[in-house]
Image (spheres, rainbow, N blue to C red):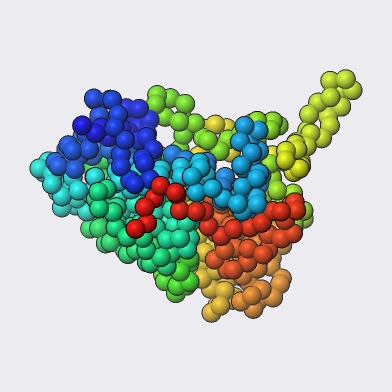
Amino acid sequence: MKILKNILIVGFVALIAVSCEIEDATNLNGPTTDSVSEDLSRAELRQTMAGVLADMRVQLATQTDGQAVAGREYWRFQSSDPRWTADLLTGTLDDNTFYTTNPYAARYATVKDINLILEGLENSTAGFSAEEIAATRGFANTIKAHELLMVLNQQFQNGIRVDVNDPDNLGPFVSYEEGLTAVFEMLTTASADLANAGSEFPFVIPSGFDGIEGASGVPDIPEDAIVSPADFLTFTNALMARVEAYRGNYASVITLLSNSFMDMSGDLRTGAYFTFSLTGADIANPLFFALNSTVANARIAHPSFIVDAEANDNRLSKVVFREVLNDATGMVEANPLTSDNLTGTHDVFIYDSNVASVPILRNEELILLLAEANHITNPTAAVAAIDIIRTAAGLPAYSGGTTPADLVTEILNQRRYSLYAEGGHRWIDLRRFDRLSDLEPLDRGGDATFDRFPTPANENRN
């Protein structure tokens, strides 16, 4: 019998094969896939949803690193695996290696677990109320949409499978555009469910979502500091706004952001986060490396991030100059790091500990999405949003041109620095505006850019 592993038992669900099957395991205390899908109990819902939320973090570092390296945000040095500075910088990609198969499999593992929950919810005899069912469906489909969007971000025009409900009869591959439409429709369904979901979820919402608590304007019941379905709906709407921006549906973006947790005068860091800890079966933040790490494992800021920055941009604090004490002279000296004919002087350091939280979606991105949504039809509103970001970064107000082309250049630049090293956004952004050539000149002879990761070799596209 197959066992559904989760954070409360062993940390997270093991990676699936690319064909979307859950691996067999040996823990007999956890809910089985059969028991979840055939008659979901309240305890199984709480336990399995905890596993889903834990599994969202699996291969997070591999996907973030892959996309960030592709977008020349930073270099990933790992002396035991030169593919980080070979394949990913030359564009000669392998369809059967870790940077291709692992994120793909991990995201579909989470999708599979969500499908089991949704199936079990339909078959449940546990007496869930109509509001509890709506809350669970709304939450689950929002997370499912997020995971499928993550796959789309890597696969791009390769397309993805959306229908993977039956592992023995997988749905067809759909195009990138069809995939975005399917994700948007999934979020639309989730939004409708959350609007009818009452005041509480029948499972625990992790603390990483506490930042959106109260964003709906509806007091939380029964007590403060509990994220309600109405609060979570503001995250769903924010995620929908991101998808609509990717689709170029800017009027929809503006409407969705008005119903999200976006706050033009609020803390730019407010939002939803992945959280980590060193307790129990939890995991540490995989995107944290100590300062002055060696070539064994390091993330080194691409030199252009420093060179291209405007004077006094406080977002340069996301990278730290490498220096070391010379014991012989007693002087502090520069400590650049070189690997594979690449030399960098600054460490990436946006996460200052191995339990620091990692953003899923936050207010700063939403304000920049608003600027983008207005850059054609309302340049004054676009500049106002841009200036919120510039002011927070310690920069003067925007004084450049206000044509759509001018504003796109400025918005992309602000997204480059505001969202640096948070999820490979620069590569996605340059690709969707057909500006990957902005990454040139490249670092070495033979280097190249690419716009998608290959479909894993063992994924049968027939």
- Residue 256, visible in the rendered structure: no
Between residue 68 and residue 48, name the one nearer to us. Answer: 68
Q: Nearer the viewer, residue 128 or 68?
A: 68
**Residue 194 x/y as whole percent:** 27, 56
- Which residue shows up at 68% across the image and 59% down it? 439
Residue placed at 57% from the left, 63% from the top? 431
Viewer-proximal residue among 141 and 34: 34
The quadrant in which residue 86 appears is top right
Q: What residue is shown at x 46% (from left), y 42% (from top)?
A: 102
In the drawing, does residue 305 fall left or right of residue 47?
right
In this figure, what is the number of numbered marks? 0
Q: Relative to residue 191, is residue 400 drawn left or right?
A: right
Position of 51 with respect to 208 (left or right) is left
Quarter of the rendering occupied by the N terminus: top left
Q: Quadrant of residue 438?
A: bottom right
Relative to 190, does residue 208 appear above or below in the rendering?
A: above
Dividing the image into 4 quarters, which one contains the C terminus?
bottom left
Residue 283 at x, y = what percent? Answer: 45, 31
Q: Can see residue 41?
A: yes
